[in-house]
Amino acid sequence: MKTPIFVRELTDDERQALEDGLRSSQAFVLRRSQILLASARGKWVPHIAEDLGCDPQTVRNAIHAFNSRGLEALQRRPPIPRTTHPAFDAQGLQRLRELLHQSPRDYGQDVSLWTLTRVAEVSYELGLTDHMVSYETIRRALLQLGKSWQRAKRWIESPDPAYARKKGDGTV
C-alpha cells in the first residue's frame, strides 16, 4: 500500500487564506480550499474525493500543487505550455516539402499514398524532427508552407468499355 499523502503543516496565514477560499465565487478556488483543509484535518485522499464528489487524482494534484507552490496552487494555471519549440526549422520545412513530392515507396513504405501519420514517421526516420511528432504537427507545418492537406481519394475505374455510358458520363 502506498503511503498516504497530506498537505504540509499550514501556517496561520495559509489557513486563513484557505478558509477565505471557502467563500470564493470561483469554483476552482473553492474546491481547492475544501480539499486542502480536509487534508490538513487528516482526511485521506479517497475519503476527500468521495465527500466532494471528485476523482482521487484531483485531490492528489491539489495536495501536490500546494506542497510545492503554496497558496499559488489556488490559482488556476493556463492549460497551454509556457514555451513551445517548433518541430521543423526553415531547412526542415524545405526538406518536408521535398519529401512530399516523392513516393512513399522511395522510403520503404508499402503504399503509394502519403498520410499525415506516414509523413510523421518518415520525417522522424530521416531526422527532420528530433522526436516523433503527431499528425497534427505535420498538418501545421504544411500550413506554414502554404499547403493544405486533403485525404487521398481512390477513384474506381472499370475495364468495361461501356462504363462511362452506364455511369451517365458519356453519350453513346
Image (tube, rainbow, N blue to C red):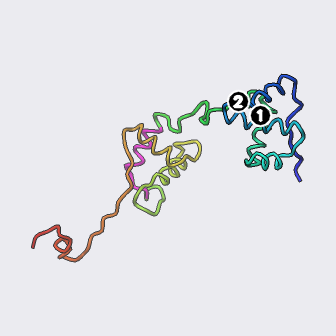
- Compared to residue 48, the image places residue 169 above or below, namely below
Q: Position of residue 65 (x, y in %)?
A: 76, 35
Q: Earlier in the sequence, mark 1 or mark 2?
A: 2
Residue 143, picture quadrant:
top left
- Asked which secondary structure carries label 1, the reply is helix
Does residue 36 lie above or below 153 as drawn? above
Asked if the stretch drawn in magenta spans residue 16, the answer is no
Amino acid on which disc 1 is placed: Ser
> Where residue 96 sits in the image (x, y, percent)?
44, 43
Q: Which residue is mark 1?
A: 33
Span of residues in magenta:
92-104
Q: Which mark is residue 24?
A: 2
| Magenta highlight on residue 102 | yes
In-front residue for pair 54/118: 54
On screen, residue 155 versus residue 20, left or right, reads: left
Q: Residue at x 43, y 62 (%)?
A: 111
Q: Position of residue 15 (x, y in %)?
A: 84, 27
Q: Quadrant of the C terminus?
A: bottom left
Q: Which mark is residue 106?
A: none
